[in-house]
Amino acid sequence: MMANYALSDIVERHAFTANGRDRVALALEGANRTFAQLNERSRRLANALRGKGVKPGDRVAVLMGNGHEWPEALFAITSIGAVCVPVNVLLNGRDVAHVISDSGAVALIADKTAARALDGLADLPPIRVWVEGAEAPGDGWNGYEALISRASDAAGAHRPMASDPAMMYYTSGTTGKPKGAVHSHAGVLWNSYHQIGDINLTDDDVYLLVPSLSWAAGFHDVMLGLMWRGGRTVMLPTGGLTIERIVDAIERCGATRVLLVPTLLKQLCAAPEAFERLRKTRLRRIYTGGEVVPPVVVERINSELPNSPVIQMFGMSEFPLMMTLMTGEDSVRLPNRAGRSSSIVSIAVRDKDGIIRPEGDGEVLIRSCATMIGYHNRPEETAEALREGWFHTGDMGQIDSEGFLMLTGRAKDMIISGGMNVYPREIEDIIQTIEGVREVAVVGVPDEKWGEAAVAVVVADASVDIDAAVRSLCERELSSYKRPRAVLVRQDGLPRTPTGKVLKRELRPWAETQLKD
């Protein structure tokens, strides 16, 4: 029988070689884990979970902040054929309960990060493991280190098939209730392998991990691919991150790569002293994704850091995490693009007539060996998302003659005014160039004459006359049917999901109410 590759092979391939076992795989605040240490502890945890009754196919929820225990848990859970269910560290108790209940998790591994969310929750999984460092939230918890110390480090008899489910990521819920996207071992490995060539990972690379490991971007952007290559990942603790702390870490660990979400890129632009420090480091790539990055932000960073260009990526919890990506040179030339398809992705658009085309405007479709198996216990939604042999992303975009994708917004966010399509992204990019604008979102509201009309919701410095500035700029830059009907200044920040995506479904009713008052 042909041997199957599983997720744990990412670690084992180095742990079993003389020149790999003592290489540092992970670092956190001065504490290192070699590949051999990571492999041994993962095996011990796997045997401990098996001893507690976890079986192949069972779901195990993990609610922890960044730390050495998180990768150990991932490789342990998946090596016994169980399914790892990361739980977003930013979720409240109700949302955590939804993930645990919807996934049918039989076990939960948690640390102090989870204490508040778990407080008062009933119906927790019967098998519960608590990482020491704070008091467990109730009875019935097994100590993490105690379990590991008593367990064997022998390889288990069961080996999962490449087609078996390995992980389940819950979507961010921008348009509805979060649902679990299920991924196979093969899908996760494809998502990791292709990055080695597509972004030129080497064993000399040091990746500074900024995102939470509970997010898809945590493990699946750079980290697992670099671990396969034998490079080192330096983790930052969860919470309290600032640009200053990130720059400090880049200097200290000699990072060559980092991923910064658009919010952090904006903070970087507001800290000119950080640019001077970064120019003296080994940093060579800044990756970003999760939401559209204003071109003005990309242009500023690429100008200040010519040796560390911003590499935009487009990906989803349904995978791949790098559906499209830019090269450094293209990022400078085309700051408003999300890139070309990666080596394991075919990309197309479905136009307004339902025809699938290799270029033009429409809903973005992708086909890849790394795409999810489907949504957990949601056959109808799975069939809808994967119909016609393509994964329907729900994002609108334009693919040009060179194959570059420009995202224009979510399909449900597109505004149809007087029969004309209005893409919020185009308006947002223009308004974002106004000095003093911190955040902007454009939503459609009902209009008696046009059916829908665009409304700009802006968060800005108090010193700026935003209404006048937006109207003046949009009159110069936009066709009349695209111009916002109204400009609403919002004192609070824009509502966002736990992973930072703007919740336009909450902004629309808020905008309607403001216009009626």
Image (cartoon, rainbow, N blue to C red):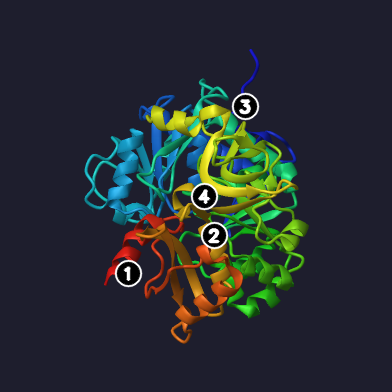
Q: Which residue is mark 3?
A: 5
The answer to whether the residue labelled 1 contacts the one labelled 2, judged by CB atoms less than 8 Å apart, is no
Q: Which residue is mark 4?
A: 68
Answer with the quarter of the image where residue 353 lies. top right
Q: Which mark is residue 515?
A: 1
Query: Is tag 1's residue or tag 4's residue first in the polypeptide sequence?
Result: 4
**Which residue is at a point 63% across and 59% down the rendered structure image?**
258
Side of 255 relative to 482 (left or right):
right
Q: CA distance from mark 2 to mark 3?
A: 41 Å
Q: Quadrant of the C terminus?
A: bottom left
The answer to whether the residue labelled 1 contacts the one labelled 4, judged by CB atoms less than 8 Å apart, is no
Q: Amino acid at mark 4?
A: His
Q: CA distance from mark 3 to mark 4?
A: 23 Å
Query: Is tag 2's residue or tag 3's residue first in the polypeptide sequence?
Result: 3
Q: Which residue is mark 2?
A: 425
Query: Disc 2 or disc 3, which is closer to the eye?
Result: 2
Q: CA distance from mark 1 to mark 2?
A: 22 Å
